[in-house]
Image: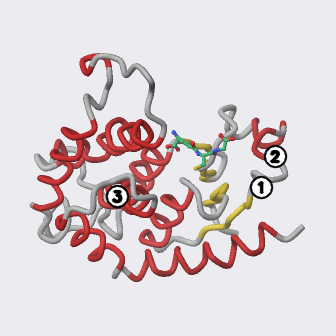
Amino acid sequence: MPQLTLYHAAPSRSSIVHWMLEELGEPYDIHLVSFKKGENRQPAFLAINPMGKLPALKHGDTVITEAAAICTYLADEFTRPKLNVPIGDPRRVIYLKWLFFGPSCVEPAITERAFPRKEPPARSTLGFGDFDTTMDVLGTGVAAAKPYLMGEQFTAADVIIGSGLRWGMMFKLIPERPEFKTYVARLNERPALKRATEKDAKLQAEQERP
Ligand SMILES: N[C@@H](CCC(=O)N[C@@H](CS)C(=O)NCC(=O)O)C(=O)O
């Protein structure tokens, strides 16, 4: 029986971890949680993640939540596919920066764009500063990706930053800059992402059956 179980709704932020698991190549189970049926707000799931949100991952008896934390954990725990930059490697600072830049800058910048506030707070109080600066920093990083953020090595940071870009571009919330399009097109060629996307389409049909 696989030691890894992904609590998942397809497609959603748990698709980020679904992609990561496909990159990892370890056996895993999927436990579908239906938003429509409100399963994420029921006691059984709240015992897994009191936030009532997906993704959550069970590894043996351990539960971990938050997409970027899960991807960081998996990359460090299962080192065979070399999806992490380990402690002691000077490149780890850049790797960690991108892993955190996803949920703390890219995602809130996109959400702000989708649901703009009438009176936006001062730039200094927002963790992401402002949308344009976030996009500029992201653009510079992605333009330098040869072919990935950490160079030749594909890492969990590409899963996090790539997922944010793919999601933002799908909903037309991120400008279609050539560097974004080139990087995302490169990621879309990864067999693991193709597998996760195909599986998600099937799971979506399954989870929507009454
Ligand atoms: N900070 C969380 C966000 C997770 C999140 O918002 N997930 C959404 C799915 S895309 C969810 O579970 N929404 C259901 C709800 O809040 O009721 C992460 O990065 O993992």
Quarter of the image for residue 137 reads top left
Instruction: Tell me the residue that label 1 is attached to.
Output: 34
Of the two numbered discs 1 and 3 on the same chain, state the one appearing first in sequence: 1
Q: Is the residue 43 above or below the residue 166 in the image?
A: above
- Mark 3 Cα shell of 10 Å, populated few (<14), some (14-19), many (≥20): many
Q: Name the residue at 28% across, 56% down.
A: 175
Q: Mark 1 touching mark 2, by CB under 8 A? A: yes
Q: Decide if ligand 1 comes within 8 Å of the CB at mark 1.
A: no
Q: CA distance from mark 3 to mark 2?
A: 28 Å
The amino acid type found where label 3 is placed reads Leu
- List x then y, in percent, for residue 140: 11, 53
- List x then y, in percent, for residue 41: 78, 39
- List x then y, in percent, for residue 144: 9, 61
Assign a secondary structure to mark 2: loop
Quarter occupied by the N terminus: bottom right
Of the two numbered discs 3 and 2 on the same chain, state the one appearing first in sequence: 2
Q: Name the residue at 83% across, 42% down.
A: 44
Assign a secondary structure to mark 1: loop
Res. 165 mark:
3
Q: Indicate left or right for 174 with 86 as reference.
A: right
Q: Indicate left or right for 88 with 113 as reference.
A: left
Foreground disc of the pair 1, 3: 3
